[in-house]
Amino acid sequence: MQIKDVQDTIEEELISHDDLEEKIVQMAHRASEDYKGKNPLLVAVLKGAANVMTTFSQAMTIPVEIDYMSLSSYGSGTQSTGKVLVRHDLSTDIAGRHVLIVEDIIDSGFTLDWLVKEFKRRGAASVEIFAMLEKPARLKFPVDVKYKGFQIPDKFVVGYGLDYDEKYRNLDSIAVLKPAVYKGEYA
Ligand code: 5GP
Ligand code: MG
Ligand code: MG
């Protein structure tokens, strides 16, 4: 079966493009007030958070610096013995910096829990989080999220940077795909 259009693959749209961006902009405005005079560094973990970083940073009304990291998580989120490997590190020395992590989705919280501790170890003056999506039912490593986007049910979602098999990151809303996609029936 050939995909004509990415919209044809959607089973259910959970959050529309407009609702998503309205919330991201609202949180960016709030952060702009909070970080006035603090020269914040926005950090996103690639690849999923790249889209939300773009929208969030463009909506901020104060000058900010932006940096990216690439991580690989090993071990399940239920195991505190799981390891995180840094594939691509920041190019910024964060000692003494006010760091705001811009995240796509918090599932178990394992990755973020590790990242917050790592940034504190590196001497950040403060570490806060904006999360576009959270799955409260799945949270195992409680992380303190200062700027909240949407809470979603325990469903696998794609879009706005989030992938299934590296695809669907370009979808402009948050959606659940048709079962046929996961069964590999679309080429
Ligand atoms: P955590 O460390 O919180 O368990 O996992 C966070 C990462 O798992 C996210 O950054 C994302 O890459 C992936 N992830 C978790 N839930 C979903 C989901 O529903 N859809 C997609 N595409 N990725 C997810
Ligand atoms: Mg992420
Ligand atoms: Mg992924």
Image (cartoon, grey):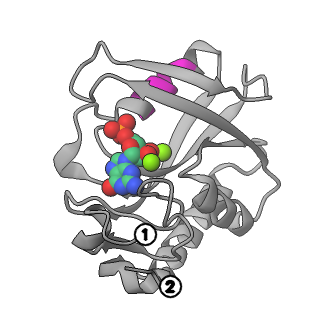
- Neighbor class of circle 1 (other Cα within 10 Å; few <14, some 14-19, many 20+) is few
Amino acid carrying mark 2 in the image? Asp
86 drawn magenta: no
Q: Which residue is tagged 1?
A: 187
Q: Going 58% across and 48% down the picture, which residue do you hit? A: 47
Residue drawn at x 67%, y 58% is: 32
Question: Could you tell me how far apart the alpha carbons at marks 2 and 1 are, in whole angstroms?
Answer: 30 Å
Crowd tier of the residue under label 2, counting other residues whose Cα lies within 10 Å: few below 14, some 14–19, many 20 or above: few
Compared across the picture, whether 91 is left or right of 69 comes to right
Please say whether residue 169 is visible from this viewpoint.
yes
Quadrant housing residue 144: top left
In the picture, the disc for residue 105 is none
Q: Nearer the viewer, residue 179 or 104?
A: 179
* Residue at the image position 47 percent from the left and 58 percent from the top: 162
Q: Position of residue 183 (x, y in %)?
A: 25, 63
The residue range painted magenta reads: 112-118
Magenta span contains residue 117: yes
Residue lying furthest left in this view? 137
Where is residue 103 shown, x and y percent of the image?
51, 49
Kindly identify which numbered label has been placed on residue 18.
Answer: 2
Give the left or right position of residue 103, taking residue 35 as reference.
Answer: left
- The residue under label 1 is which amino acid type? Ala
